[in-house]
Each structure stands twice: as C-alpha cells, then as structure tokens.
Image (cartoon, coloured by chain):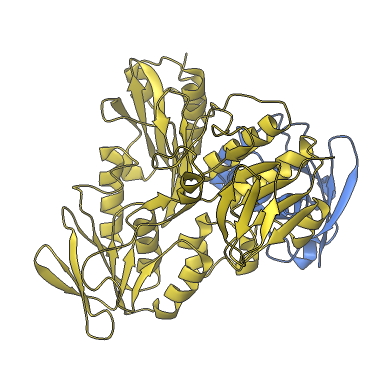
C-alpha cells in the first residue's frame, strides 16, 4: 500500500512539498491541514503591494484550485492539529477526530511576537502576518491618520513605506540604534534610514515603546518617556516558531523544530520545513531562517528524503525587501565580524555591500543592483576569494569581479 | 479569460486560462506547468521564470524595465525574445500568447 502523508501547516513550504513530492514520485494520498480560512498563499506581498492595494487578493494564492485536485492533495482548512501520537502514527484534529499517517511533514511556520506592555490589547493595535491582519489594518489605513510602528525591521519598514505613500503620518520606534540591525550592515541601515526620512517618516532610535495609551482605543504610544499621539499602532517585533506540537510529541525543539540536513527529525517518519525549523546551515552553525527561500528549498529536500533520494541541504540563504522603489536583495548570512565593502555610491540609490570573511565573499546586500546580488550569491555559493579593492572598484564590471 | 500557451522544452503545448492582471509566470506555477521555477514568487529577484516569447507576440508586450533587463542577463541561454514571465501581465489583448520555456532555469 502506498504511504499516507499529512502536512501540518498550509504555507509556502507545504505547497512546495506537495509539488516536489509528486515530481519525485511520491504516490500516496496527501492531506494538507491549515488553520486559516484560506488555502496556501504568499505572505511577502502582504506588507508590500497587497497593503498598498496594487495586488489583488486572488493573486496571493500560490496555486489555482485545480492544482490540489490534480496533485491528489486534500486541503483541510480552518482545521488545527492539536496533537501528534508517534506510537499510533496519528494526528488529532481540533474536532476530536484523528487521522493516520505514514509520513508527517510539519510546516507550521511562525506566529507574531506580541507586545506585552500596558495597553497592548487596545483596539487599533495591529500585527501583520495573515490576510486577515491586513484586511483589519486596511480599515484604518487612511490618509491623515497617525500610525506608530513598533520595530524597525522588515515588516515595520515595509509598512512604513506603504503608509508614507498612502499619506499617513508615520513614526517608527526602534529599540536598537539602527534599522534592520538583525538583517543588514550599518551602511545599509543608514541608507534606509535616510530614505525613510526623505519620505517623511520619523524614526526614533534606541526607543522602546513602554505603553499604548487610550481609553477605548489607541490614542498614542508612550516611548522614551514621551507620549506620541497615534490612531493606529502596528507591531513588527519578530516572530516565534510554532514548535509546540512537535515538542509535546517528544521531538527536540530549540527555538524551532530541530531537523537534520535532510529536514528529518529524530523520528524518521516526521519531517519539518520552513520558518518553524532549526537546522544546521551550510556554514555548520545551528540556525533558524525566516524566508521564502528556506521554505522552498527545505521542502524540496524533505521531498527528496521522503522518496529515497536524500540530498544535503546547503543552499545559500537569500532574502528581499521592497520599500518605496528600492529593492533590497540579500544573499548569505553576514556576521558583525565580517569586513564590509561598499560598491557604488549610495547617493545614486543603487549600490551594494559585500561581506568578506577571511577574504572570501560571505554575503552581499544589494539595493536596486540585481547584478551585484546575482553575482554575489554565486560568489558566496562557490566560496570565492575577491580582493576588497576589486569589489569597491565599479570600473570593473561585476561579472568580471572574481578576475 | 485569456489563454496563454506554454510550450515545454520538448515542444508539448499547455494551454492555460490565466486571469487578466495575473502574470504569465503565475499562470504557469499555479497550474502545474513545469519549466518555470519563479523561486522568488514574482519579485523580479531570481531570473528563474525566463521564457522565449513567440516573435509574433513580441511587439504586443510592454518594454523591459532596467530591472528585468539586468536580471535577464543572469538567465541561461537568452535570446532577443527572452523575457522574465513574472514581469508580463496578462491582458485581453494577449489572448493566445505563446511562450516557450527553456530547457532549464538553473
């Protein structure tokens, strides 16, 4: 009899797994269980084009309805998995029923980290993770309104850019001394800070939000001892992995479901992919990535392992962000100890930052400089040594940078 | 709904009805058409949705942006009729559009 696969979670990794498993020859029935009302959709546009209103909801969906039918995949939406029984190889659903599996893929993703300060429960405090979150935010997202954004990371800044474009009055509160500190180098942080300032966005650095003030709804944010009047608060202070289901089933978790380099947990019937996993990256360090790339590539590797074609996952991580007309593209994982080289003039709004580790290209961050990103990614993948003065010299075409 | 005809590297034709406003890339990846990877989901960030547009249709398409041009430089085996399908929006005028897919996107 062919194996039955259950996928918990209905995001990017889940869909990729369905697609790859069929291509790789997995013949058994697949059940995809998601707790949202919607079938699998793309999250990246939510904080960008979808919030701006230039991207229709219909386009968010990763696949046409026919895809699931033709792929022999049953979609069970509005359904939560409440437990995994590894002895009987069944999952329990929130309606009390249970489903048997031979293979289980956990693609449970993450959930937003909640604000815990006083007033955090007030109406008008928003998060951005789901379609429903954006639809809720849209109601209040009107020109002239004042929005306080907690957190100067990707989500906060993408929303800030859309808000500024839509004519809202925007203030960003960032606890660190620079923007996107966890994700990009200082030259890149400084460049984006200047761009946001040009667009009229106020940024308060080293300023944590102490309380959300208001009687029946948000009236302001108290930060650094000052009260900033606000109609809307958007919180973008990171996410936490949904690893509780795995943990309760006795699987190892550590800020994420621990998997090996094939995506397998210590239980050979159970795999995990995407934002919810902690895995050993290509540099040999234990990491948890939050990205489309990781969701797709890890799901592909899970599919390979499940069909007896296991291959080590060692893809270069990559990320992107759209703010205004700026496309930020990143490949590789930079470290604070890397040597950074700026290529091009940030004033032209088209430049990149290369990171060298022991002389070898370890990461690249590019703004409106796709060729630098594409070449940089390849240099990272191949572990190429490039002299810093060559990287900085824009007279040398990027395609010839390695010499 | 406009129909886009995706022609595989082996010559097989896959006609797909694609809603107006969707990209040619989306029409493929949402409907099990193999040959367009679109790793980045349409952000013009990966050059893995490269197609060859049937010459008869080339003039009906909007011109390439600098970004698309720059990214196409990284697609494999490009030709003058190469485009990134994530940048091609389907319109009623494009009903019948024929695009050919390369042997590999990577």
Position of B77 with respect to A157 (left or right) is: right
Q: Colour of chain B?
A: blue
Q: Quadrant of the N terminus of chain A?
A: top right
Q: Position of residue B40 (x, y in %)?
A: 58, 45
Q: Position of residue A105 (x, y in %)?
A: 62, 44
As drawn, A345 above or below A392:
below
Q: Which residue is pictured at 38% across the width and 38% down the height?
A: A351
Q: Which residue is pictured at 53% across the width and 51% down the height?
A: A108
Q: Nearer the viewer, residue A373 or A401?
A: A373
Q: Position of residue B86 (x, y in %)?
A: 65, 50
Asked whether residue B42 is in view, the answer is no
Q: Residue furthest front?
A: A87
Q: Colour of chain A?
A: yellow
Position of A86 with respect to A231 (left or right) is: right
Q: Nearer the viewer, residue A47 or A31?
A: A31
As drawn, A159 above or below A146:
above
Asked whether residue A271 is in view, the answer is yes
Q: Nearer the viewer, residue A396 or A265?
A: A265
As drawn, A227 above or below A388:
below
Q: Residue furthest left?
A: A225
Q: Residue furthest right?
A: B12
Q: Which residue is pictured at 37% across the width and 61% down the height?
A: A161
As drawn, A396 above or below A238:
above
Position of A201 with respect to A139 (left or right) is: left
Q: Which residue is pictured at 71% across the width and 41% down the height?
A: A102
Q: Position of residue B100 (x, y in %)?
A: 81, 42
Number of callouts: 0
């Amino acid at each position: 009899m062919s194996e039955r696969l259950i996928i918990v979670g209905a995001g990017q990794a889940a869909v990729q797994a369905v697609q790859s498993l069929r291509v790789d020859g997995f013949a058994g029935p697949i059940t995809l269980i998601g707790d949202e009302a919607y079938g699998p959709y793309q999250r990246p546009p939510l904080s960008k084009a979808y919030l701006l209103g230039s991207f229709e909801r219909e386009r968010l969906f990763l696949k046409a309805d026919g895809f699931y039918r033709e792929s022999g995949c049953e979609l069970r939406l509005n359904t939560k998995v409440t437990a995994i029984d590894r002895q009987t190889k069944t999952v329990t659903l929130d309606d009390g029923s249970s489903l048997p599996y031979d293979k289980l893929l956990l693609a449970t993703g993450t959930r937003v980290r909640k604000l815990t300060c006083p007033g955090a429960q007030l109406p008008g405090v928003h998060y951005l993770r789901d379609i429903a979150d954006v639809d809720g935010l849209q109601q209040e997202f009107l020109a002239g309104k004042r929005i306080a954004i907690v957190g100067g990371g990707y989500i906060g800044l993408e929303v800030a850019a859309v808000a500024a474009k839509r004519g809202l009055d925007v203030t960003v509160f960032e606890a660190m001394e620079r923007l996107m500190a966890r994700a990009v180098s200082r030259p890149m942080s400084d460049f984006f800070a200047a761009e946001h300032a040009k667009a009229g966005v106020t940024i308060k650095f080293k300023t944590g939000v102490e309380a959300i003030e208001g009687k029946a709804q948000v009236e302001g944010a108290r930060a650094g001892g000052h009260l900033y009047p606000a109609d809307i608060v958007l919180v973008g202070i990171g996410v936490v992995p949904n690893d509780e289901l795995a943990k309760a089933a006795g699987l190892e978790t550590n800020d994420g479901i621990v998997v090996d380099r094939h995506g397998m947990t210590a239980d050979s019937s159970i795999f995990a992919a995407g934002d919810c996993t902690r895995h050993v990256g290509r540099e040999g360090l234990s990491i948890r990535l939050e990205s489309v790339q990781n969701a797709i590539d890890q799901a592909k590797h899970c599919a390979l392992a499940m069909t007896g074609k296991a291959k080590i996952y060692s893809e270069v991580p990559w990320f992107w962000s759209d703010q205004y007309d700026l496309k930020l593209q990143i490949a590789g994982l930079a470290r604070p100890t890397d040597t950074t080289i700026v290529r091009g003039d940030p004033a032209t709004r088209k430049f990149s930052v290369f990171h060298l580790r022991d002389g070898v290209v370890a990461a690249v961050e590019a703004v409106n400089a796709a060729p630098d990103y594409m070449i940089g990614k390849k240099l990272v993948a191949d572990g190429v040594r490039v002299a810093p003065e060559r990287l900085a010299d824009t007279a040398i075409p990027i395609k010839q940078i390695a010499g | 709904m406009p129909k886009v005809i995706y022609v595989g590297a082996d010559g097989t034709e896959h006609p797909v009805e694609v809603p107006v406003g969707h990209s040619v890339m989306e029409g493929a990846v949402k409907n099990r058409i193999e040959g367009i990877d679109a790793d980045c989901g349409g952000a013009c960030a990966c050059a893995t949705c490269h197609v060859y547009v049937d010459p008869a249709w080339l003039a009906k398409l909007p011109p390439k942006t600098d970004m698309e041009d720059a990214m196409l430089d990284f697609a494999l085996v490009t030709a003058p009729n190469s485009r990134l399908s994530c940048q091609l929006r389907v319109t009623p005028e494009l009903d019948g559009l024929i695009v050919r897919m390369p042997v590999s996107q990577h």
